[in-house]
Amino acid sequence: MRTGMAESWWMHSAGATSYPALEADLDVEVAVIGGGIAGLATAWELTEAGSRVVVLEAGRIAAGVTGHTTAKLSALHTRIYSRVRESFGPRFARWYAESQLQAVERVADVTARLGIDADFERVPAYTWTETPDGVAEFRAEAEAAAEAGLPASFVSTTGLPFAVAGAVRVENQAQFHPRKYLLALAEDLSRRGGRIFERTRVTGLNEGHPCTITTEGGHTVRARHVVVATHYPVFDRALLFTRLEARRELVVAAPIEADRDPGGIYLTPESNTRSVRTAPYRDGQRLLIVTGEHFTPGTGDVAQHWERLEGWTRERFPGTEIAFRWAAQDNTTTDGVPFVGPFHPGTDNVHVATGFGGWGMSSGIMAGRLLAALIAGDEPPWAGLYDPRRLSLARETGPLLKLQAKVAGHFVGDRLRPAGTESVDDIAAGTGAVVRVDGEHRAVYRDPAGDLHAVSARCTHLSCLVRFNEAETAWECPCHGSRFTVDGAVLQGPANRPLPPLT
């Protein structure tokens, strides 16, 4: 049985925002679509440099993916350095390390300079293995990370309350409260003349000089430069959706005494991923935050994932009582490196930031610095590593074909197989199912009072059939990760239009 409040600690412990919705047409230098960490970091960097910037957010800023992260601020990203060195070469591995370390230090610098109370703490970062057979790979990663310029070493002991076979340790990384940091950044951006509009969903982009953005409310924004920082790009013209795989992870949090703090940020790719860190809590306690059980949205038994994660937490940290639970979502590129830069080969004034692979804190800050530099005409040496226009058949053909086969399996297979529920009468209260009515797939939810809520089962992104996530009471697309409320409203893109209501 799941316990704890179904709310992100970051959302629970930071104030709400009340920026207005866009109610008039605008002309600006730069329009940033998306108010998460990448969008706000980009907007702040540009505003500090003197540009006229507007941020357009469909919901509330720092409340989507960024508001549900685990907020590990580190340049150690599982085993990325071995992969980058092998796929791109040693020089690119050094650039990856340099850009990510600069992002960590940027947060430290801005936090101190603006006096932001964001619970910023310096801690070591670890990637651990409990399998003796995996030690060789982790030793190799420590060597690759050190060669790339990180203060990395291989260790056999950590601060975790259980034994490990080995771990990569990187000194002087960090953890912080992402929402407190970004809300302070937004306030400073506004003081400098930047403008933020919430509840303003962007539905169209006409590229040109200037670009023209249209919103759900019927208003337009003309901008010399546009940044698409919507987590998963809401426009498909670059076909990045063929190179991005959505991944959802679960999070539980429990108070522990300060002397039980493992003193670092930890991650293992084993056991379907486990991530551990702590944050300041109440009455001198720490809040233990454990993440894991990743899965593709719209697939699997999410309730079982919750049970496994909660069971692991109680086994490894005995006596813990879950206080909060939430879920995070991110996208991984087919070559494992984020896409940050020009949206596609035919543009010089539309940029994108996506594909952070679970490391959105440092990569989001990195994206902000990189995009601000590119828009100013100053290209860092490591810009090419992240350029979305890169495409290597040697690196990406296998993962790309595997990803598209999975998508095709849902797009075609879900239509051919019989609906799991034959009649709406079979849908119990508090559950949902896709049913065929007059030959049409409909997503039907019966609320606790017994009333039915029916919407089209075709995702408004590329028409895959959605599935019901009972644990989170949402419709999810297994193809590209779009998520919707039971009444069809968009929770997460790439879809930017709701599921149409049906009888």
Image (tube, rainbow, N blue to C red):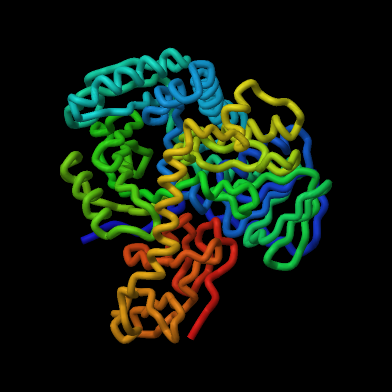
Q: Nearer the viewer, residue 394 or 153?
A: 394
Task: Give how far across and how far down residue 312 sits, in percent.
Answer: 20, 45
Q: In the rendered image, which quarter contains the N terminus?
A: bottom left
Give the residue drawn at x 52%, y 48%: 242
Number of marks present in the image shown: 0
Give the residue drawn at x 61%, y 46%: 229
Q: Along the horizontal axis of the image, is 453 left or right of 190?
A: left
Task: Give how far across and how far down residue 453 sits, in percent.
Answer: 44, 80
Task: Give how far across and how far down residue 283 sits, in percent.
Answer: 32, 43
Give the residue drawn at x 31%, y 86%: 425
Q: Along the horizontal axis of the image, is 283 left or right of 225?
A: left
Q: Nearer the viewer, residue 3 or 144?
A: 144
Q: Is residue 403 above or below residue 145?
A: below
Q: Along the horizontal axis of the image, is 155 left or right of 200?
A: left
Looking at the rendering, which quadrant does residue 262 occupy? top left
Residue 68 in view of the camera: no
Q: Nearer the viewer, residue 425 or 449?
A: 425
Give the residue drawn at x 57%, y 46%: 240
Residue 134 in view of the camera: yes
Task: Give how far across and how far down residue 314 sits, in percent.
Answer: 19, 46
Q: Is residue 182 above or below residue 20?
A: above
Q: Nearer the viewer, residue 258 or 91?
A: 91
Looking at the rendering, which quadrant does residue 448 occupy? bottom left
